[in-house]
């Protein structure tokens, strides 16, 4: 454990000292991605798995198990492919109800510093949770109590069938261990880029 922490610390320092010199970063700067929204990825089956519009139950205290984030096979992929990887805070929760159907809107603010270089300049987002969304059960159970909670958020723009940009996301627990795994994944991704 101690050796792994030391190794990750040494790697992080090495990457920071290099400042990207001599290694191509896998993350595009914000201005490049903002200008390239016309070339957004399609929200295909793999993207639906990675950016599943979900809140992990552990992030709101709904699990007795405490699985290690190192065992989460999608965490590294989220960290390397998201447009925004950062701590996020839910500022407001609003609900649109039509009959028995409710749609939740979570207004989130991106924390500083981000855990990875953002690919978009946006600092606030609205996450929509429809009855068909995986996060719907948590949104319905917590409702306004989600306001003020913090998470580690992974947000990515995709192209709708109409060509319009749409965001999809995933919220993980805001813990030191999740943040460490994300930072390591980003550092290793940048270090190993061609």
Image (spheres, rainbow, N blue to C red):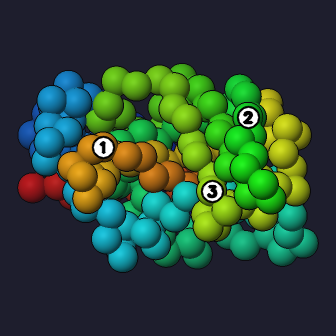
Q: Earlier in the sequence, mark 2 or mark 3?
A: 2
Q: Which residue is mark 2?
A: 94
Using the image, tell me which numbered label, if any, was put on residue 165. 1
Answer above or below: position of 168 versus 84. Answer: below
Give the residue displayed 86% in from the left and 50% down from the top.
142
Q: Residue 5 at what x, y percent from top left?
A: 57, 54
Task: Give the mark nearer the N terminus: 1 vs 2.
Answer: 2
Tag 3's secondary structure? loop
State the residue at coordinates (30%, 54%): 160
Residue 111 seen anywhere in this rendered image of the structure: yes
Q: Which residue position holds label 3?
A: 130
Q: Nearer the viewer, residue 29 or 50?
A: 50
Task: Give residue 104's quadrant in the image.
Answer: top right
> In this rendering, is residue 50 above or below 80?
below
Q: Is residue 178 visible?
A: no
Q: Nearer the viewer, residue 31 or 133?
A: 133
Q: Residue at x 80, y 59 (%)?
A: 100
Q: Is residue 29 left or right of residue 155?
A: left
């Amino acid at each position: 454990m101690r050796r792994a922490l030391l190794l990750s610390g040494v790697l992080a320092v090495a990457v920071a000292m290099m400042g990207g010199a001599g290694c191509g970063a896998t993350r595009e700067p914000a201005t490049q991605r903002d200008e390239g929204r016309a070339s957004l990825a399609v929200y295909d089956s793999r993207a639906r798995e990675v950016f599943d519009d979900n809140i992990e139950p552990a992030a709101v205290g709904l699990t007795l198990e405490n699985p290690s984030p190192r065992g989460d096979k999608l965490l590294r992929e989220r960290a390397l492919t998201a447009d925004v990887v950062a701590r996020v805070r839910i500022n407001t929760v609003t609900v649109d109800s039509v009959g028995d159907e409710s749609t939740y809107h979570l207004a989130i603010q991106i924390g500083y510093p981000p855990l990875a270089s953002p690919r978009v300049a946006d600092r606030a987002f609205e996450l929509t949770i429809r009855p068909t969304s995986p996060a719907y059960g948590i949104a319905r159970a917590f409702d306004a109590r989600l306001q003020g909670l913090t998470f580690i958020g992974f947000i990515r723009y995709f192209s709708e069938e109409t060509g319009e940009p749409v965001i999809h996301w995933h919220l993980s627990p805001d813990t030191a261990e999740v943040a460490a795994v994300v930072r390591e994944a980003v550092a290793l991704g940048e270090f190993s880029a061609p």
